[in-house]
Amino acid sequence: MRKFVNLTPHPITIFRTDGSTVNVEPSGKVFRLREKDVIVTEIDGVSVVHRQFYIAPEDLEVFSDPSAVYIVSLPALIALSTIKEPSLSALTIVAPDTGRGGVRDEKGNIVGTKNFIVL
């Protein structure tokens, strides 16, 4: 079984196809996109910003074990897919599917996922 490394701040429950579950606690390291806002206009006294997301090279240091499965947020996964970094292509980086693959409780809150997303 491969080791999951949860790079989100939230515990993740994975519902396997055999009915068992795996709880993956946060690793203590969070892979977040850095952001910069540029004000582009104002509407009725409210600033409208263009949010630019980026990844700094030192952020990639969290991906150090090629045998691990790294779990990141979907926005982070999308941003990572745009980077042409050879060391990333050898890694398994996924995001929890909280859409169609999301498992919800009786109140509609997401309690886990049945799928991972890759790009």
Image (tube, grey):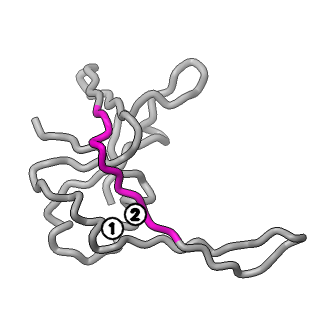
Q: Where is residue 7 in the image (x, y as percent from the top left)?
A: 32, 48
Place of residue 72 in the rendered image (x, y in percent of width and height, measured from the top left): 35, 51
Residue designated by label 2: 78
Q: In which quarter of the image is the C terminus?
A: bottom left
Q: Residue 101 carries which label?
A: none
Extreme right residue here? Answer: 44
What's drawn in magenta, residue-wise? 24-35
- 20 on left or right of 67: right
Query: Looking at the image, do the residues carrying marks 1 and 2 touch, with CB atoms under 8 Å apart?
Result: yes
Q: Name the residue under label 1.
A: 81
How many numbered badges does the structure rendering display?
2
Residue closer to the observer: 89 or 47:
47
User: Residue placed at 26% from the left, 55% from the top?
Assistant: 93
In this picture, is 74 found above or below 98? below
Q: Along the horizontal axis of the image, is 39 left or right of 73?
A: right
Q: Quadrant of residue 10?
A: top left
Residue at the spot 63% in from the left edge and 79% down from the top edge: 38
Q: Which element is circle 1 on?
A: helix
> Circle 2 — which element?
helix
What residue type is disc 1 on? Ser
Q: What residue is shown at x 87% (from left), y 70% (from top)?
A: 45
